[in-house]
Amino acid sequence: MDHLFTVDGGSATPVAPTALAAEGLLERQHLQEWVIANPQVLGESVLVITSEFDRWADTDGVPARDRLDVLGLDATGRLVVVELKRGTADRDVHLQAITYAALVSRFDLDTLAQAHRDFRKGRGEILELNECRQRLLEHVDGEWSPELLQRPRQVIIAADFPKQVTHTVVWLSEMNLDIDLIQVGLWKVNEQLVAGFTKVYPTPEVEEFTLAPARIEAKAAAQKLEERSRARNAVHVIVGAGLLPDGTRLTLTPRHGVTDGIREDILAWVGEDSSRASVTWSNNTAKPLAWQADGKPYTPTGLANHIFTSVTGRKADGIQGTTWWDVDTAHAPDTVDPDEWGTLAGTSLAGLAKQLSGTGKDWTGLHTLLAAVPAGRWTTYGDVASVIGSHAVPVGTHLATCGQCPNAWRVLNAAGRISPGFRWTDPTRTDSPADVLSAEGIRFDAGAADPAGRLSADTLKTLTGK
């Protein structure tokens, strides 16, 4: 963050940056604690295992003096090694991070569980070793993978980075070492200190085109990382877009990672008990699927792996579970228009995520657009969704539950009919949206609005200057 301003209407006043040292803030007591309390600055879904770790020995059995600032575990099963500097990073800070990564790359589940138990004990939380082990296992999507533990991701956080560090980190990244550089800034606003964390390397473009997991030389580990990351990202995209209401049913269609013969065996196994083919969705990014066969929560890949092993007796490897679960369009949620829901037929979780990439739950644009729809005109959920970059289903769900959407009655389904899920925010209202639209001059024929009054997506864009 290069510039920070305090804003008063049309006036923006620059805020001068300060520094941790200038404010008497320390590396361990302050910066480190900020990171531990807010692990999201290290990336998505990182569990802090320990900090200030120094319980390792060299080949002669002599304890090493190196002290690892923070060690985390992300949901794909990779360790996250964190090096902190409250000021400008040392010219060899990347060498420190690599050293720590090499040291922790030999850790196993028991070593990490012990470190986590000691870490939590130092913070007043008494846990049994088995509890810590289970906490680590549950944090990882899919099976625990020693191969992924051997390839830690490194994060260096500092107030600034010398060119020797940035140039070297770029080259190391091109050589398939994952190193993130995060800049911490500090400002004082009305005597209140404000800290900001900005990822300066790699940028999203570099991550996508230069550091793709497929370039990692250890192909087996890369495949697991890629599949788990893809599956986890799909779940986050769907939850973030609000596409699937809680309670949505999904059905099993084995796809990725199985041969035709195994697919037939799985379908035959499912035929013995129909509950094996059905799950219920909840908007929980950790384990969103409840399997009807046992009532337990799973990740999409975790359940696909479980089913694969149950049928074949073999360990699954590299399955992308989000391709296995399709929306059950025979059971539309109450808040969703059945016609719009039907458009999701045959679409897997992976397919939904691909459609929704880049969407989210910020409905400000929707409210602005709806406010511009004039009386005597109507539009559809799909048209609105295409303008704001969403999907007809979450738009319909939001309209049914928001309570603040202007002109919500002027949005109909693709057939020009009132959605069965439409609800007035005032429960005492007895008139229907069709009554209001008719009073505004829109004619209805057999329950369908006159197409001449419809505003297309292209016309909607002109209303808001898009």
Image (cartoon, grey):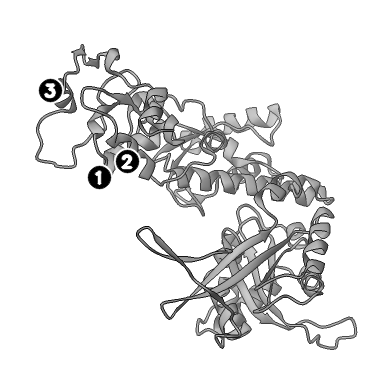
Q: Are marks 3 and 2 in contact (CB under 8 Å)?
A: no
The residue wearing badge 2 is 367
* Real-space CA distance between mark 3 and mark 2, rounded to the nearest whole angstrom: 23 Å
Is any part of residue 333 visible from this angle?
A: no
Q: Nearer the viewer, residue 371 or 282?
A: 371
Considering every residue shown, the one lying at the far top of the view is 445
Mark 2 or mark 1, whichever is nearer to me: 2
The residue tagged with tag 3: helix, strand or loop?
helix
Compute the Cα span from label 2 to label 1.
Answer: 8 Å
* Quarter of the figure with residue 101: bottom right
Please give the label number shown on residue 404. Answer: 1
Q: Which mark is residue 439?
A: 3
Tell me where residue 334 appears, x and y as whole percent: 29, 35
Label 1: how many Cα within 10 Å (few below 14, some 14–19, many 20+): few
> Can you see residue 437?
yes
Residue 426 position by quadrant = top left
